[in-house]
Image (cartoon, rainbow, N blue to C red):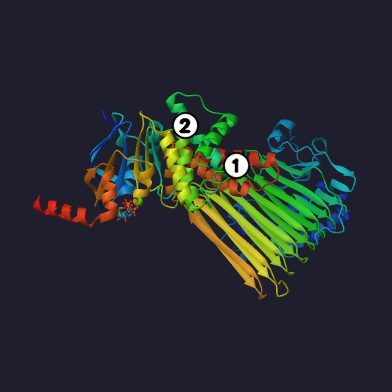
Amino acid sequence: MALLEIKNLHASVEGTEILKGVDLSVNVGEIHAIMGPNGSGKSTLAQVLSGNEAYEVTDGSVTFDGKDLLDLEADERAKAGLFMAFQYPVEIPGVNSAYFMRTALNEVRKHRGEEELDAVGFLSLARERMALVEMPEDFLKRQVNEAFSGGEKKRHEIFQMAMLEPRLAILDETDSGLDIDALRIVSEGVNQLHSPDKAVIVVTHYQRLLEYIVPDFVHVILNGRIVTSGDKHLALRLEEEGYDKIRAEHEEQAISA
Amino acid sequence: MATTRNDTVDHYLSAFEAFQNDLNGQASSPLNEVRKRALDRFAELGFPTSRDEAWKATDLSPITSTAFIPHVEFPRSVTETDLAPFRFGLNGPTLVFVNGRYAPDLSNPTDEDGVTVTASDEIDPEFGRIAPFDAHALTALNTAFLLDIAVIRIAPKVRVPEPIHLLHYTLPGEAPQLSTPRALIVVEDDSQASVVQTFSGQEGGPYLNNAVTEIRIGENARLDHVKMSLEGPEGRHTSNLLISQGRTSRFTSHTVSVDGAFTRNDISSVLAGEGCESTVNGFYILEGDQHCDNYTLLEHQQPHCPSHELFKGILQDRSRAIFRGKIHVHQAAQKTDAYQQNQNILLSDDARINTKPQLEIYADDVKCSHGATIGQLDEDALFYLQSRGISRSDAYRILLRGFAEDVLGRIELESVRDELTRRVLAKVDRNGATR
Ligand SMILES: Nc1ncnc2c1ncn2[C@@H]1O[C@H](COP(=O)(O)OP(=O)(O)OP(=O)(O)O)[C@@H](O)[C@H]1O
Ligand SMILES: [Mg+2]
């Protein structure tokens, strides 16, 4: 049974349909890359999967670990082991990062039947995981994402992932905003966290990331639908050709269909 | 019971006679002369109306439509158990006032090492200079029925190690009663002190605490001030806080309104010495039909003075809040750097906030900025927290706490800060079920 099974997913925002029948199956141990032009619906898919109620699911189904994912609130999805690294992490003034992370981690741990961490236990785990993404410790003292640079926000997302140890991580353009060194550090972190009982979906525009995080499958999303899938060579092809050819092929298909 | 404004003014005029009789021979004291003049002035002024700029948006009827009764003596006594929740673990010099009267057995006054913290019915030479009764009706009313005046005096070059606490506690009686808390605080040159004023009360009926505090801060002196209203559910609270600051002095105040049916805070800070700095912060959290009104006036009279003002509020149910922030930069006050912010979160469609900055600038080389926000909680932030495993109701609480701590977190006294945060969150939680 697939860890994530998306069938004919349709979703709209403020009455406009964005996802127009997405099918995707992700098994444990796999890394999937989703590519596609701006505005094609990649972030929408990530947001819908993680339970953002601003998006309305109008058709289709999603199961996660055999359970109906769409039935769960966003926090229940996170507790069940789903994690999304935001393309645009949200700044939360007034909320201390350490407090936020410890609260979230303990919620997830409680759900898994694990012991809650006290301040000391939390700090030692946090230190270890911050080292993984080479994030300075004083970030914990700051307010969540407040005045973080673009790259710092992205590292902070992967740090959270490292803390929560999700079964499925969806990384929405985690590479954008990272400098060359940070891209390598963050990618290595993601690879270290990956294991045969987990899965990763990376959303990216660039082949560069996929040299570090090597995908088993690459999917191209166009206008709210996955139009073609392949292995890592598909990403190389896209890098050379751009989306025009696929777009043209797809339009032909759409016309002949 | 009186119903109209004029009736209520008349009520105080006749109550004054009974009050005089109860004073038993003290009626010829210098204080009583001041009382009489203040009463005359109150009769002339009457209550403020919506024609007064500073009272335009305020519905003052919770004050004017009830005949609150001034008392010389009050029969009911208060125990340490009643007061304990309002002590905040502050063990320094403390004056406790119960229903406006000084309670020596519950207090810890001092008069040594340059630190004077006493209650008195004598007129200090500085009394009424910063808070004259002729300009402000509620100050006149306060002065007319004055009993025990809290006096804090810090001699020059003294650093007071512990915070000083003025704790007012009201037990509502059968009839609605008037208390007139009054404090004079003088921090002389190069001294440093921290003063906490707590206004608290029990449930059991309406009462009015009509408080006046006047503060003079000497050259290069520093005062940290916290004023809390934690009045009973039917308690009404009006407060006039006036500050005059000397050269390079620093004043930091937090006016926190948590409980009480009606609250009006007037805060006027005169930056009267070059290079002095004034921080006037506030926080309010309202529920039910509560009303809270903050009127601030910063008088920049001298050059090179920064002022910072941050007022934040959470409004629930049908509550009402008003914020008026006036910054007056006099012609001489070049290089003024004044910053003002008022931020509000409305958690109910029926809550109302009326917020207005007012800048009057007569100097040309100044920096003044102001802003006001009114909104709901940020849905993106709620989702972000939820997406990490935090339930929506906890996310709600975390965001509101963050919003409040932006102000409360600036209070230096940890025990006060923690207890206020706890009370604010308790109030948020009480209303959580309605969301
Ligand atoms: N909250 C919203 N309100 C209105 N339109 C939206 C909203 N969210 C997404 N859209 C629209 O849906 C479409 C898909 O957006 P989405 O963010 O999913 O694209 P994307 O594939 O992630 O693009 P990019 O590569 O630029 O990140 C866009 O046209 C976008 O404008
Ligand atoms: Mg996107």
Q: Amino acid at mark 2?
A: Glu
The chain containing the residue under callout 1 comes to B
Given residues B167 and B417, the one toward you in this image is B417
Q: Is residue A90 left or right of residue A38?
A: right
Which residue lies at the image location 20% right of the left edge and 53% below the top edge?
A246
Q: Position of residue B188 (x, y in %)?
A: 85, 56
Vertical side of B383 occupied by B57: above or below: below
Q: Position of residue B38 (x, y in %)?
A: 77, 60
Name which quarter of the figure residue B331 lies in: bottom right
Q: Is residue A102 left or right of residue B326?
A: left
Task: Count the marks.
Answer: 2
Q: Secondary structure at mark 2?
A: helix
Given residues A69 and B257, the one toward you in this image is A69
Q: CA distance from mark 2 to mark 1?
A: 36 Å
Name which quarter of the figure residue B3 lies in: bottom right
- How many neighbours does mark 1 have within 10 angstroms: few (below 14), some (14-19), or many (20 or more)? some
Q: Which residue is mark 2?
A: A107
Vertical side of B419 occupied by A197: above or below: above
Which residue lies at the image location 69% right of the left edge and 41% below the top edge?
B414
Vertical side of B134 occupied by B144: above or below: above
Q: Which residue is mark 1?
A: B233
